Image (spheres, rainbow, N blue to C red):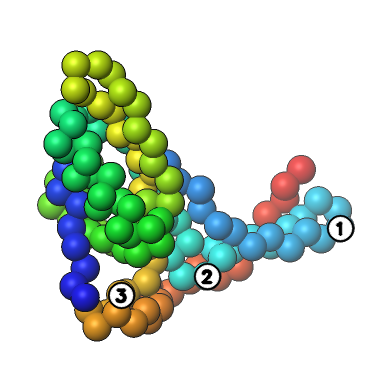
Amino acid sequence: MAIREFTWIPSSSSSKSHQPRIKKIQFGNGFAQMRPDGMSSDLESWEMDFDVPDLDKRAIETFLAEHRGCLVFYWMSPETGSDKKQYTCPKWKVNFIGAGNYSVSASFEEWPGLILERGGVEMLPDLEMLPDLEMVNVN
C-alpha cells in the first residue's frame, strides 16, 4: 500500500512544538552528563485547526480514521510549504461551528523512521553523528 498524502491546508491557527529527548546522568556536586536520546531525538509536533465545510470535514475524518493514529502519511507543514515529511495523527476532534461548517482540530507528530512502500517498517538512523557527551553544572 502506498503512503498517502494529507493535502488539506490548516487555518491560521497552527503551532509547532519541540520537546527534544535527552539522556541525563546526574553526578554528585551538581554535575551531570547530557546527550540526545538516540537518533532523531528532536521531532516536531503540530497542533492545528481546519475550518471546513461538511464535505471536507467528512474527507478529513475518513482520512484520519483510516490511518488509525498509527499509520504514517506525508504532509507539508505550513512553515516549509515544500518539504514533505512523514507524520502520524494520534488524536483529532471535530467541532460544529454552524450552518454546515466545522472545525477539525488535529495533532500531527513527525515520524522518525522510513516506511517502505510494501508495508514494512524500517528504522533508519540519521546520517549525522551524535555530539560528544559534555559535562555541565546544573546548579
First in residue order: circle 1 vs circle 3: 1
The answer to whether residue 135 is above or below residue 120 is above
Which residue is drawn at the image coordinates 30% and 75% (left, top)? 115
Residue 78 appears in view: no
Q: Position of residue 73 (x, y in %)?
A: 26, 60
Where does the image place residue 124, in percent across and percent down from the top left?
A: 37, 79
Q: Residue furthest top?
A: 98
Q: Within 10 Å of the Cα at label 1, are there few (<14), some (14-19), or many (20+) other Cα atoms?
A: few
For this view, does 110 lie left or right of residue 10?
A: right
Determine whether the residue tagged by mark 1 lies in a helix, strand or loop.
helix
Disc 1 from disc 3: Cα separation: 43 Å
**Which residue is found at the position 56% from the left and 65% from the top?**
37
Closer to the chain start, of discs 2 and 1, is 1
Between the residue at mark 2 and the residue at mark 3, the CA separation in whole angstroms equals 19 Å
Identity, as a three-letter code, of the amino acid under mark 2: Gly
In the structure shown, which secondary structural element does the residue marked by tag 2 occupy? loop
Q: Which residue is mark 3?
A: 115
Residue 39 visible in image = yes
Q: Amino acid at mark 3?
A: Ile
Q: Nearer the viewer, mark 1 or mark 3?
A: 3
Q: In the rendered image, which residue does mark 2 sit on?
A: 38
Q: Is residue 17 left or right of residue 24?
A: left
**What residue appears at the point 39 percent right and 66 percent down from the top-left corner?**
112
Q: Quadrant of residue 5?
A: bottom left
Residue beneath label 1, please?
Answer: 28
| Label tally | 3
